[in-house]
Image (cartoon, coloured by chain):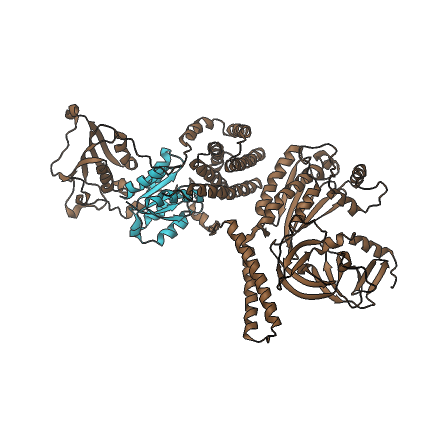
Chain colours: A cyan, B brown
Amino acid sequence: MTLTVLAVDDSRTMRDMIRMALMPAGFTVHLAEDGVHGIEVLGGIAPGDIDAIITDINMPRMDGFGFIDAVREQYDHRATPILVLTTESSPELKMRAREAGATGWIVKPFDPAKLVKALQMVAG
Amino acid sequence: MSEQNDPMAEIRASFFIECEELLEALQDGLQELDEGGDDPETINVVFRAVHSIKGGAGAFGLEALVRFAHRFETVMDEVRGGRMTPDADTMKLFFLAADHVSDLVRACRDEAPIPESTSEELLARLDELLGDEVETEEADASDFTPLGFSMSLDLPDLEPEGSTFEIRFKPEQELFATGNEPATLLRNLCALGEATVRCNSSELPDLEDLAAEAPYIEWNITLKTEAAEAEVRDIFEFVDGLCVLEITSTSPDAGDDVPDVDIDAGIEVPAVLEVVAPSPSQPSAPVSKKSTKDSGEEAGGEPESKKGTAPAAKSVVRVDLERIERLVNLVGELVINQAMLSQSLDQAGLSPHSDAMNGLEEFQRLTRDIQDSVMMIRAQPVKSLFQRMSRIVREASAAVEKDVRLVTEGEATEVDKTVIERLADPLTHMIRNAVDHGLEKSDTRLANGKSRAGTVTLMAAHRSGRVIIEVTDDGAGINRERVFEIAVAKGLVPPDAQLSDGEIDNLLFLPGFSTASQVSALSGRGVGMDVVKTSIQSLGGRITISSEAGKGTKFSISLPLTLAVLDGMVVNVAGETLVLPLNVVVETLSLGPEDVQMLRPGAYVVRVRGGFVPLYDLGVMLGYRAHRKTDAGAIVLLISLDDGSRAALVIDGIQDQRQVVIKGLDDSFYRAPGIAAATILGDGQIALILDPADVIAGMGNPRGADIMLSERKIANE
């Protein structure tokens, strides 16, 4: 099952890794550098064309929580699956992500196959 | 997937490039904090830089880097959270840690040995800052295990024998607010094996009482699968706490333990989930309440306030330097070609108003624009170079136990990338010299009424078509007596030589000269100022020195803007075609017999608007011809030298002003003084490019001539 995914991360390396993990699985990957950029990119894609969103937490301008908030405020994306990419797997962080409206989380560094699988599972 | 291009190697390379940028941001941020900046975004930038380095390093399994960055990040998090306020010593440690991160990054990149002892020492010092926190952080560190990034798909181990799970799943309202979808979860579950899904919709109210986003439905699933229980639970990982979930494993003889489930009104849904209507995943407006208040905390600041201050990310394309190199070369060829074309059209005697000539004019303009744009690609601000120097100053001052402040000016000045790269070594050496030899010890400074901390200033600027870089210290100045003594002792000058201050200063550039009577750990590396001078010259640059006793010393480097193209004046001298950099030519004059005056045989000056300027015959200086009786009727180029003085060069004629492509002379040629490079002219002819200041320096100090001028009465020829 191939999906169209928006990945938001301020680290170019991370964006490259995400792209590298998802492209071989046949995914279409849109990339953004921070929350503000993510919202912009999202705005350029028809809501029905995006299957899932991946976002980092720590980013300049608008962090992951703010970004998830902003995405959920869009009626079209109130149920779009959003995975948080995080280096910490602390329960507090998961709770905060969930409160913001995140669907799930992936701990960095991630295994490409697991990222693909997780996306397929939430966006199936 | 194909491994031909080795995408991982590419990402790895790009990671290290990104690291350089992050290290720069880190350095900048620390600098700002050190200078008392209290913008919360600054500490955020510092934190994020370390964080991102750690993140990438983890992906590539760079354990040493991860470990160090993690601890550094933890400390930064304390600062960010306001639980720690760094004092001056802490800031010093932060700088050291940042330098060390930079070392680790480079060691990892070059696969060089990791400087472990430094790591341990700095880690210990960072731990000290953390105090009691270390214990808990250690646990967190183990949570973050580096993982070699591999593209292989590791399939979950399958349990050999099948088992049956009874699953009760009842979503709660919050589940829908997170974008989780029961239908998807059930579908994933069904994918694990053979599932019988029963839907209990007994709580479903009448349509008019139905709230779209409220959960009414409960599912009971019997799953026959070879998957382990953990895998089944994994499916519900993201909804843990957002639903009622009971999973029981039933072995054939434990069937009685299965809790009875209410299956009345149950619908059989054998893995066909489209049947699971009505989908309750219709969250609406109330969902958007959430945690706007504390969402800024993690990143330390309100996202809204950041929007205003932070500049939008610049969009950047990364291009392989080789490709740019190729483009530069091609543009060089284009310039030569265009010159050839104009020359042949010119010779064809076309009317200047013909279409061909008009077209040519446009072509020239475009070529020039292309060239400028291509050169812009190669230009980089000197900032990264200067940043590296701030580290050199820190290390050097620590080594000789002096208090040194580095002031940088003109960081935004753009210089050709190659020049920047090749300046690093000479500048490092000069900075070390300034700290080691230039600046006095603190007590000496205090005794002389100076500030305790010495200042080294690093300045870059564009001046008359060249790049000027100055390294200035406010130290004691050059001890000329000592320099002279050493030069005599080393047999570099005869003991009875009468040298001007400037000449003594220039002795420093002689090969084999070193003033440090004791070889210090810093500058006693067997590399002298002569090597610095040679590296600068190989870049087409010049270095000069000026010093004032008690006030300090200034080294001034003057470099061409680009290494590829030059605006030149093509001239004839004694039948040879030569090119002079146009930017040094101030004026062209035609020489009348009364303009030239002789100071002494072989030394002439020319009168220019009431002043006198030393006059040199290029033909003589380059050995093309013997001295002529009179230069009357010749053409004179008035040129300006780096130090602001002027000189006049006698030539036979001016051919043209044009851009020429600089072709370096092969190393196998002996470095002829005054010859900077060569070029190919429009007609295919090869011409040498001159460095006029170097030509004149080869003839003796022009300032010497100025002094003579002021002291002697000028006699008419």
Above or below for B627 versus B180: below
Q: Residue A11: in sight, yes or no?
A: no
Q: Position of residue B484 (x, y in %)?
A: 80, 40
Above or below for B376 versus B453: below
Viewer-closest of B44 and A47: A47
The image quadrant of residue A116 is top left
Above or below for B267 versus B317: above
Above or below for A82 versus B335: above
Q: Residue B535: in sight, yes or no?
A: yes
Q: Position of residue B263 (x, y in %)?
A: 13, 35
Question: With B596 as the anchor, is B571 left or right in this view?
Answer: left
The image quadrant of residue B508 is top right
The mark tally for this picture is: 0
Q: Quadrant of the C terminus of chain B?
A: bottom right
Question: With B310 as the anchor, is B287 left or right in this view?
Answer: left
The residue furthest left is B264
Viewer-closest of A6 and B294: A6
Question: With A86 as the anchor, is B678 left or right in this view?
Answer: right
Residue in the picture at 41% in, 49% down: A36
Viewer-closest of B285 and B432: B432
Q: Quadrant of the N terminus of chain B?
A: top left
Q: Position of residue B72 (x, y in %)?
A: 50, 34
Q: Position of residue B556 (x, y in %)?
A: 69, 48
Viewer-closest of B5 and B79: B5
